[in-house]
Image (tube, grey):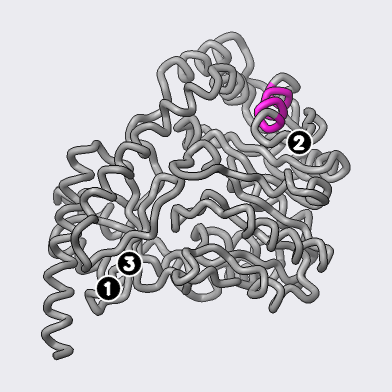
Amino acid sequence: MRLSKRIATLHDGGSDGWDVFYRARKMKAAGEPVIELTIGEHDIGTAPDILDAMHRSARSGHTGYAEVPGIPALRDKVAERTQARTGVATTRDNVVITAGGQAGLFATHLACCDPGDRALFIDPHYVTYPGTIRSGGAVPVAVQARPENGFQPLARDIEAVAGGARSLLINTPNNPAGVVYSRDTLNGIAGVVEAHDMWLISDEVYDSQVWRGDHLSPRALPGMEDRTLVIGSMSKSHAMTGSRLGWIIGPREAIAHFDDLSTNTNYGVAGFIQDAALYALNQGREAEDAVAAPFRRRRDKALNILAGQNAVKAVHPDGAMYVLLDIRATGLSGEGFANALLDARRIAVMPGESFGRAAAGHVRVAMTVADDLFCEALETLVAFAGELARDNMANAG
């Protein structure tokens, strides 16, 4: 039987970007000692008190159908958090709860784009972005944010492909680059979005992981409140990745339609998960800072390890739980280097090419193992890259 073109072409006939990860997992399953620095999965796990709150809620009976847009108390809390951090007036009517940030990305593109519409996104990008756009029937169009510009997207590059587009998806703090978009960058983006009457979809799931500078939500810029849809999540801020609890924040009229969409998709998020999320958010910013602390610490250690050598150059990590490394001095592609590193040193990292063309010649390192193991792995990576770079120079000479 024939499947729909929508399903069959999610990855446009190419790789989904996870080949090295899958290979590393098979090696570990076979008993090989692989250090995984691939996916953004916290090594600390969800806090026990959050799990206790989840258990209490389930045991008390909140296991039936929950309110589809989200329980009012949780929507109120998300609105309160958003208003406090952005200064934009936000109420529960601006919030719909989703089954994780990924469900929010799918819903926003389904809502903003009709089949065949062009939907822009910034490259480098999280690996699901093109497939998510295709799954809604839209046509993904990449806009490269180049390494020579610090992976900050330029308004003129967006403008060059904006004609007729219905939406633009951005991600700041950025995965994989670790870049926090500047106010100038966001003002430029806002200008193009307004000029072409597009929706701006802003993935801000790493808003609690900012190491240098400040995170600015584009929804807070003049004229952008009514055309911006913000994606948030408990996954990164509270290490609740498996709980699948996220949200969309946007204009009241749009959010009412997302309520209808949720009714016809996952029919809400489990009540005991929502209660646990409400408990977690009620612990305040200190709890989020505690979850972020290991990544801040490892980021500083990474910069110290990378100092004083030239084989590997770091894209300065200003946010998120990753370090993007330029390994072009080795003469290998990101994919080639990642596979060679896995084979020779049993360390798994993600190829830059997994995240689009702009990150070619780079690898993404997730700071998601204990400090000593992370430092050991990064030191090994740097030494391995140094050997390859010396061989590359000798061959070139």
Relative image position of residue 316 (x, y in whole percent):
39, 55
Residue type at mark 1 is Gly
Q: Which residue is mark 2?
A: 88
Q: Nearer the viewer, residue 116 or 279?
A: 279
Q: Residue furthest right?
A: 253
Q: Residue at x 52, y 49 (%)?
A: 173
Contact, mark 2 vs mark 1 (Cβ under 8 Å): no
Distance Cα–Cα, label 2 vs label 1:
45 Å
Q: Quadrant of the C terminus?
A: bottom left
Disc 2 or 1, which lies upstream in sequence? 2
Residue 91 lies left or right of residue 155; in this view the side is right
Q: Nearer the viewer, residue 354 or 397?
A: 397
Q: Residues within 10 Å of mark 2 (few under 14, many from 20)?
A: some
Q: Which residue is mark 3?
A: 326
Disc 3 or 2, which lies upstream in sequence? 2
Magenta segment range? Answer: 74-83
Q: Is residue 256 magenta?
A: no
Residue type at mark 3 is Asp
Residue 312 lies left or right of residue 362; in this view the side is left
Relative to 101, residue 394 above or below: below
Q: Which residue is mark 1?
A: 336
Residue 308 lies left or right of residue 257; in this view the side is left
Relative image position of residue 66 (x, y in whole percent):
70, 25
Q: Quadrant of residue 260?
A: top right
Distance Cα–Cα, label 3 vs label 2:
38 Å
